[in-house]
Amino acid sequence: MRAWRVIRTVVICYVVICTILAIILGELAFRPRRVPVAMRPSAEAIAARFGADLKDVSVIASDGVQLRGWFASPANANGDAVILLHGVGDNREGMGGFAELFLSKGYAVLLPDSRGEGESGGNFPTYGVKETDDVHRWFEWLAAQEHPRCIFGMGESMGAAILLQSVRVETRFCAVVAESSFASFRQIAYVRVGQFAGTGPWLGKIALRPAVELAFLYGKVTRGVFLTDASPENAVVGSRVPILLIHGLSDDNIPFRQSEWIRSHNAADITLWEVPGAGHCGAVSVVPQEFDSRVLGWFSAHDHRFAPNVASLSPLRRSANTRDANRIAGIHIQTASF
């Protein structure tokens, strides 16, 4: 009888702990800090150096949320444009360094605030569930207003994950670059639980899995969003958009194996560059010149002025074209391992 009491007490405590943890995890996911846009004069000065006016632009999302951002086109425009997507708990200013790089090479740049971040509307991020269509609407705006010959995409962390999910619905990207993306929100949730406790992902995947699953259910009930639908690894399956994944081998925020898993879902059209010594979104800090060369080379190799649209080619021709692009960009294809 006493043993049953002990078992019952342990079970009740476990259920209570998992429930409390689920609420905490759910709220943490939906309540990142909102960073205000506060450096417009600096951004204007950078744009002016390349003969560009910094324009405030906006689109309306499918759910009525107003999304805001900046657009700039340099005086020496090459006819192409890049959409730059920032990470969670950040805003458009976080991609300013990359905008400066692309402006210097003649690319027009679009820097949107993700929903729930910066000056964009929305009360919380959905890590790609709703942002996928947001990116599509930004693409439509850019195509209709500026008529670029090629539209590329680049994202960091959450922005990388959103960009990868967007290629499922926006197939007209000439090529994209995604650094430090998670493979799926479910997988990164396991990692996060382990990080909080100072253990490996096994804690969230096994011991506290009920708490993680309850957190997903909590998000569905309280926000109407099932975050398990956020899955870059599933979104890239069958995509013909050329994708360059970048991940630091010393990333202790989102482990590099997340990018390896993504690539394993579409090895023909995804190239993975793993950077020794680089932390989360830190490749440009470790090897800045090589980073710029590879990213710019990737876009140049997939520019329609130099290569045919890979989305319109047969699988055999497309694979050959991707190999040529890897050669031009100086990229060695990594083999995914588990």
Image (cartoon, helix red, strand yellow):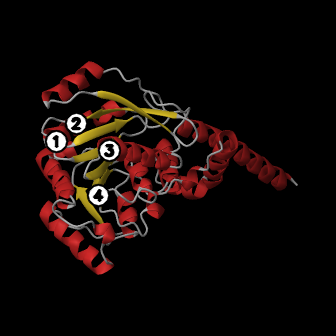
- Regarding mark 3 in the picture, which secondary structure is present there? strand
Alpha-carbon neighbours of circle 4 within 10 Å: few (<14), some, or many (≥20)? many
- Regarding mark 1 in the picture, which secondary structure is present there? loop
Q: Are marks 2 and 4 in contact (CB under 8 Å)?
A: no
Task: Work out how far the residue at label 3 is from the one at label 2, CA to CA, in angstroms.
Answer: 12 Å
Q: Which image quadrant for residue 111? A: top left
Q: Position of residue 245 (x, y in %)?
A: 30, 57
Mark 3: amino acid = Ile
Q: Position of residue 37 (x, y in %)?
A: 37, 24
Mark 1: amino acid = Ala
Alpha-carbon neighbours of circle 1 within 10 Å: few (<14), some, or many (≥20)? some
- Regarding mark 2 in the picture, which secondary structure is present there? loop
Sequence order check: which comes first, mark 3 or mark 1?
Answer: 1
User: Which sits in the foreground, 335 or 104?
Assistant: 104
Q: Are marks 2 and 1 in contact (CB under 8 Å)?
A: yes
Q: Dividing the image into 4 quarters, which one contains the N terminus?
A: bottom right
User: What mark, if any, has residue 106 been given in the picture?
Assistant: none
Task: Work out how far the residue at label 3 is from the one at label 1, CA to CA, in angstroms.
Answer: 15 Å
- Residue at x 34%, y 62% (from the top left corner): 241
- Regarding mark 4 in the picture, which secondary structure is present there? loop
Alpha-carbon neighbours of circle 3 within 10 Å: few (<14), some, or many (≥20)? many
- What residue is shown with label 1? 77
- Residue at x 38%, y 47% (from the top left corner): 139
Task: Work out how far the residue at label 2 is from the one at label 1, CA to CA, in angstroms.
Answer: 6 Å
Task: Work out how far the residue at label 3 is from the one at label 4, CA to CA, in angstroms.
Answer: 12 Å
Sequence order check: which comes first, mark 3 or mark 2?
Answer: 2
- What residue is shown with label 4? 174
User: What mark, if any, has residue 73 been given in the picture?
Assistant: 2
Q: Residue pushed farthest bottom?
A: 316
Task: Work out how far the residue at label 1 is from the one at label 4, CA to CA, in angstroms.
Answer: 17 Å
Q: Position of residue 331 (x, y in %)?
A: 17, 63
